[in-house]
Amino acid sequence: MRCHAKSKRSGEQCKSWAVKGKKVCRMHGAFAGIKTRAGRERQVKAVTKHGLYAKQAIEERREARQMVNGAIEVLTQTLQKDMS
Ligand SMILES: [Zn+2]
């Protein structure tokens, strides 16, 4: 079933497919945000997953930087010893 909405300007009917069980497409009001508890939980889970990944990635980069800095320090000290 096609969306029942009609354009105010052109008077043409919306060509999008309507959401199942509704008369309009997502653009014309069928999607009214997350209503169900399961839907909300699903969204939170998705967002949290991303957040955790970002946090982990930052942590990994921080550790890598520390390792590099530590290696540079050791190298510098070694070179200084060789020079003297
Ligand atoms: Zn529509």
Image: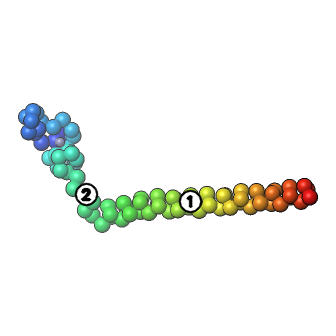
Residue that numbered label 2 is attached to: 33
Residue at image location 17% in from the left, 46% down from the top: 28
Q: Quadrant of residue 64?
A: bottom right
* Residue placed furthest toward the front: 84
> Which of 3 and 29 lies nearest the eye of the viewer?
29
| Amino acid of disc 1 | Ile
> Which of 72 and 19 lies nearest the eye of the viewer?
72
Which x, y percent locates residue 8? 8, 39
Q: Quadrant of ligand 1?
A: top left
**Which disc is residue 79 wearing?**
none
| Mark 2 crowd level (few <14, some 14–19, many ≥20, 10 Å Cα) | few
Question: At numbered mark 2, what does the secondary structure look like: helix, strand or loop?
Answer: loop
Residue at image location 27% in from the left, 64% down from the top: 36
Question: At numbered mark 1, what does the secondary structure look like: helix, strand or loop?
Answer: helix
Residue that numbered label 1 is attached to: 58
Q: Quadrant of residue 27?
A: top left
Relative side of 38 to 9, left or right = right
> Which of 54 and 31 lies nearest the eye of the viewer?
54
